[in-house]
C-alpha cells in the first residue's frame, strides 16, 4: 500500500552522535526489505524513523508522495513488532491486540471480528484471556505479531523480532513471517543482524555499517556479488576466507607464494596490484581438478551434516565446509579444488570489490 | 537458629521502640485527669473515659472561658484550653491543603516525570538535577523569600499560601520518584503505544499510569504526609484559626500551662488517624512485579 522513500536522510542525536549519515533508500510497495548489519549500524534507527518514533534531523522521508518528517508516530499507519515484544503487561492478550484498533476508533464488533481473525491466523485463540506474563516466549511473539497484523497497516516494521526465541522456534517463526508477508500483501521492513534470517526472508537486503548503506540487493546479489569485504564477511557461515596476494603480470592469476589460481575473469591493466582473494567456505571440493589449493589440515570440526575443515595455506588459516563423508586428520596435507567462478576479489587497502561495482 | 532468634528479638525491640510512644498516646487519650497524673502511670486506664474526645468534638458548642472551665484542681491542670474549638476546623484546613497538594503534585509531576524519563530533549538531565538541588536548601532559608512572595500576592493567612509553598517542597521529590520508576519501565512499551496510535499524553495515561501505580501510591503518601505534618511554613503564613492547620493548633495547646495532657494526647490521636487511614487504604495497591512479563521470555 505504500512506498517508503528516504532522500538524503540524516539522524544526529542531541549528544552529537551521527546514527545515519546520508541515507538514500527506496522501499517498494509490498516489498520485503531486510536491514542487515551489526549492532550500532543504524538499522534500528532507520526503522524508528519510518515509524516516527525518532525525528529525522536532515533530508526527507516520504510515504508515497507524502512528506512524513513531521507526522507524529500515532498518525502514521504503520505497525511494529519489537525485539522485547513490548506487550502491555496490565492488559489481557485480547486487549493487547485490540488496543491499536481501539485507539483508532474502530467499532466494538469490528474489533472483535478482527482480533478473533488475527488470533486464528496465529493460532493463539485459547490464549486471548491470559496476561502476557502467563505466556511463553513463542506465544508472546505471536501476540506481538497479532497486535501488528490486526491493524492491516500500510507498512509492517519488525525490529529483530526473533532474536529472543530459541533456535528451533526461530526457524519455524521465520517461515510464518514469510507466509504472513505473502498473505498480507503489504510492505515489510525487517531489521536483523542474523544473516540467515535476511537471506530467507528478504526480497531485497540492505547491508548497513556505521550509518552508511554498504549494498542493496537481492539475497543472491548480496551473497554472490558483494561490493566490499564488509558485505562479503557479513554473510556466509563459516565466514568467507581471505587471502592477501598480488595479481600476476597479465592480470589473469592470483598469486600468493607458491599458490597461483586462475581468475574466472581476468583483470586488465592491474598487474602487480595488491588484492584480497575471497573464497567462500563451501566453494571448494575434494575432486581433483585444475584450480588446486594445497595445505596442511589444522583442525577438523564435524558439525553433523557437514565437516568444517581448517587448512593452513601459505601462512594463512582458511576454513572450509565439506561433506561429512570427508576423512581428514589434523596434520595431514590436503588438496582441494577451488570454484574460482564464485571467488571474490577485493582491493587490499580499501576493501572494495574489483569485480562488482 | 541462633541467627533467627537474634533477628526475632532485635525486631521485637525495634517494634517496641517505634510503637510504644504511639501506644502510650492512644492509651492515655482515654485516661481521666486523675489517672494520667497518677504514679506509677498505667498503660491500661482503670476507668477509661471519652471525655477528652467529647471535649474536642463539642468544643464548638461549648464556650470555654476562664470562668466556665471544668472544675478541678488548678495545680494539676485538668483544663480544656480555650483554643480547643479550633482543632476540628484546623484538621479540615490540613485536609484541604494536603488533598490539594496531592492532586496538584500528580498533575504536575506525572507529565514532567514522563517527559524527563522518556523524551530526549536538550537539558533533560540538567533539569532533573536542578530540581533535586533545590531540595538541598533547608526550608528555613526559604522562609523569608517565601514570606515576601506570599505577602505580595496577598495570600497571608490564606490556605493558598500553604498549597503553593508545599508544592515547591514536594514536587521535586515526586518528580524524582516517578522519573526513576518510569525509567525502569521499558522504552519499547512507549514506542509500542505510540505506533499503536497513542499520542504522548495517551501513552502516559493508558500505558504508563496503570503500570506506575506503586510509584503513584508512594507519591501520594509522601506528599500527603509532608503537607499534613508541615509546621514551620504554616507557622509563618497563618495567623488566625481561619487558615491554621492542625500542627499549629496542637502545638498551641502546649503553651497553655494548665492544659490536660490527656486532652493533648486525644488531639494527637486524631492527628494520627488520617495518615494511618491513608497508609491502610493504599497498602494493598503497592504491588510490585506488575511489569513482569512486559518484556522477554
Image: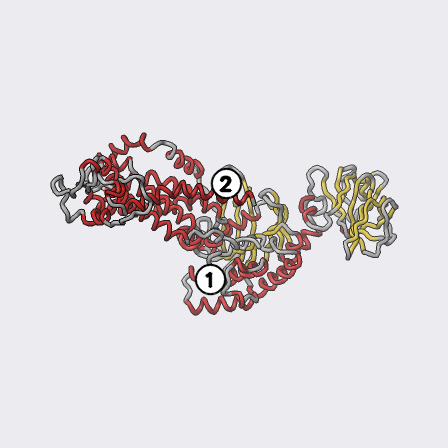
Relative depth, front residue between B177 and A36: B177
Identify the mark at residue A95; answer none if there is no mark. Answer: 1
Packing grade of label 1 (10 A; few <14, some 14-19, many >=20) is some
Give the Cα separation between the discs numbered 2 and 1.
35 Å
Q: Who comes first in sequence, dot 2 or dot 1?
A: 2
Picture layout, residue B255 above or below residue B218: above
Left or right of B144, for residue A285: right
Q: How many marks?
A: 2
Relative depth, front residue between A274 and A267: A274
Packing grade of label 2 (10 A; few <14, some 14-19, many >=20) is some
Whether residue A357 appears in this view of the structure is: no
Left or right of B70, for residue A217: right
- Which of the two marks, 2 or 1, is nearer to us in this view? 1
Question: Residue B21 in the image: x percent, y percent?
Answer: 35, 41
- Quarter of the rendering occupied by the N terminus of chain B: top right
Disc 1 is attached to a residue of which chain?
A
Question: Residue A34 in the image: x percent, y percent?
Answer: 60, 53
Relative depth, front residue between B121 and A208: B121
Question: Residue B137 in the image: x percent, y percent?
Answer: 36, 31
Picture layout, residue A191 above or below residue B234: below
Relative depth, front residue between A150 and B154: B154
Which residue is identified by label 2?
A13
Disc 2 is attached to a residue of which chain?
A
Query: What secondary structure is marked by label 2?
Result: loop
Picture layout, residue A204 above or below residue B77: below
Amino acid at each position: 500500500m505504500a512506498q517508503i522513500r528516504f532522500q538524503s536522510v540524516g539522524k544526529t542525536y542531541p549528544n552529537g552522535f551521527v546514527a545515519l549519515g546520508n541515507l538514500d533508500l527506496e522501499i517498494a510497495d509490498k516489498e520485503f526489505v531486510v536491514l542487515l548489519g551489526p549492532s550500532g549500524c543504524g538499522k534500528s534507527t532507520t526503522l524508528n524513523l519510518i515509524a516516527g518514533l525518532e525525528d529525522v534531523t536532515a533530508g526527507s522521508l516520504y510515504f508515497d508522495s507524502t512528506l512524513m518528517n513531521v507526522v507524529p508516530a500515532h498518525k502514521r499507519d504503520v505497525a511494529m513488532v519489537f525485539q522485547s515484544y513490548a506487550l502491555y503487561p496490565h492488559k489481557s492478550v485480547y486487549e493487547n491486540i485490540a488496543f491499536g484498533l481501539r485507539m483508532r476508533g474502530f467499532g466494538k464488533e469490528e474489533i472483535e471480528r478482527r482480533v478473533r481473525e488475527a488470533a486464528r491466523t496465529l493460532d493463539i485463540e485459547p490464549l486471548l484471556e491470559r496476561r502476557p506474563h502467563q505466556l511463553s516466549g513463542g506465544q508472546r511473539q505471536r501476540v506481538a505479531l497479532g497486535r501488528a497484523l490486526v491493524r492491516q497497516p500500510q507498512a509492517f516494521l519488525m525490529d529483530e523480532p526473533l532474536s529472543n526465541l530459541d533456535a528451533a522456534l526461530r526457524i519455524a517463526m521465520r517461515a510464518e513471517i514469510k507466509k504472513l508477508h505473502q498473505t498480507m500483501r503489504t510492505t515489510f521492513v525487517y531489521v536483523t543482524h542474523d544473516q540467515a534470517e535476511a537471506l530467507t526472508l528478504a526480497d531485497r537486503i540492505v547491508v548497513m555499517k556505521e550509518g552508511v548503506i554498504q549494498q542493496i540487493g537481492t539475497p543472491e546479489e548480496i551473497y554472490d556479488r558483494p561490493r566490499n569485504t564488509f558485505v562479503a564477511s557479513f554473510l556466509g557461515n563459516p565466514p568467507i576466507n581471505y587471502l592477501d596476494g598480488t595479481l600476476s603480470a597479465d592480470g589473469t592469476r592470483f598469486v600468493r607464494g607458491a599458490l597461483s589460481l586462475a581468475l574466472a575473469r581476468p583483470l586488465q591493466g592491474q598487474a602487480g596490484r595488491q588484492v584480497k582473494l575471497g573464497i567462500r567456505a563451501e566453494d571448494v571440493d575434494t575432486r581433483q581438478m585444475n584450480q588446486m589449493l594445497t595445505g596442511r589440515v589444522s583442525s577438523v570440526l564435524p558439525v553433523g551434516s557437514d565437516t568444517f575443515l581448517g587448512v593452513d595455506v601459505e601462512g594463512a588459516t582458511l576454513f572450509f565446509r565439506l561433506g561429512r563423508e570427508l576423512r581428514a586428520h589434523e596434520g595431514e596435507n590436503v588438496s582441494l579444488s577451488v570454484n574460482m567462478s564464485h571467488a571474490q576479489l577485493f582491493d587490499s587497502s580499501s576493501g572494495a570489490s574489483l569485480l562488482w561495482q | 537458629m541462633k541467627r533467627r532468634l537474634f533477628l526475632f528479638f532485635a525486631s521485637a525491640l525495634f517494634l517496641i521502640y517505634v510503637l510504644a510512644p504511639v501506644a502510650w498516646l492512644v492509651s492515655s487519650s482515654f485516661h481521666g485527669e486523675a489517672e494520667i497524673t497518677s504514679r506509677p502511670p498505667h498503660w491500661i486506664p482503670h476507668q477509661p473515659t471519652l471525655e477528652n474526645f467529647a471535649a474536642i468534638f463539642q468544643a464548638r458548642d461549648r464556650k470555654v472561658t476562664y470562668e466556665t472551665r471544668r472544675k478541678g484542681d488548678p495545680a494539676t491542670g485538668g483544663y480544656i484550653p480555650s483554643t480547643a474549638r479550633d482543632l476540628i476546623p484546623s484538621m479540615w484546613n490540613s485536609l484541604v491543603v494536603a488533598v490539594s497538594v496531592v492532586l496538584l503534585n500528580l498533575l504536575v509531576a506525572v507529565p514532567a516525570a514522563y517527559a524527563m524519563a522518556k523524551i530526549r530533549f536538550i537539558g533533560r538531565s540538567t533539569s532533573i538535577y536542578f530540581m533535586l538541588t533545590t531540595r538541598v536548601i533547608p526550608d528555613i532559608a526559604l522562609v523569608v523569600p517565601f514570606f515576601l512572595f506570599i505577602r505580595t500576592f496577598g495570600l497571608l493567612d490564606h490556605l493558598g499560601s500553604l498549597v503553593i509553598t508545599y508544592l515547591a517542597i514536594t514536587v521535586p521529590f515526586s518528580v524524582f520518584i516517578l522519573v526513576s520508576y518510569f525509567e525502569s519501565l521499558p522504552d519499547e512499551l512507549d514506542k509500542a503505544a505510540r505506533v499503536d496510535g497513542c499520542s504522548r499524553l495517551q501513552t502516559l495515561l493508558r500505558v504508563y499510569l496503570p503500570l506506575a501505580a506503586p510509584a503513584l501510591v508512594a507519591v501520594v503518601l509522601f506528599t500527603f504526609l509532608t503537607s499534613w505534618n508541615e509546621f514551620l511554613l504554616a507557622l509563618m503564613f497563618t495567623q488566625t484559626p481561619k487558615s491554621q492547620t492542625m500542627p499549629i493548633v496542637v502545638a498551641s495547646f502546649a503553651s497553655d500551662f494548665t492544659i490536660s495532657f490527656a486532652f493533648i494526647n486525644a488531639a494527637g490521636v486524631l492527628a494520627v488517624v488520617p495518615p494511618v487511614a491513608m497508609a491502610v487504604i493504599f497498602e494493598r495497591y503497592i504491588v510490585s512485579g506488575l511489569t513482569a512479563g512486559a518484556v522477554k521470555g
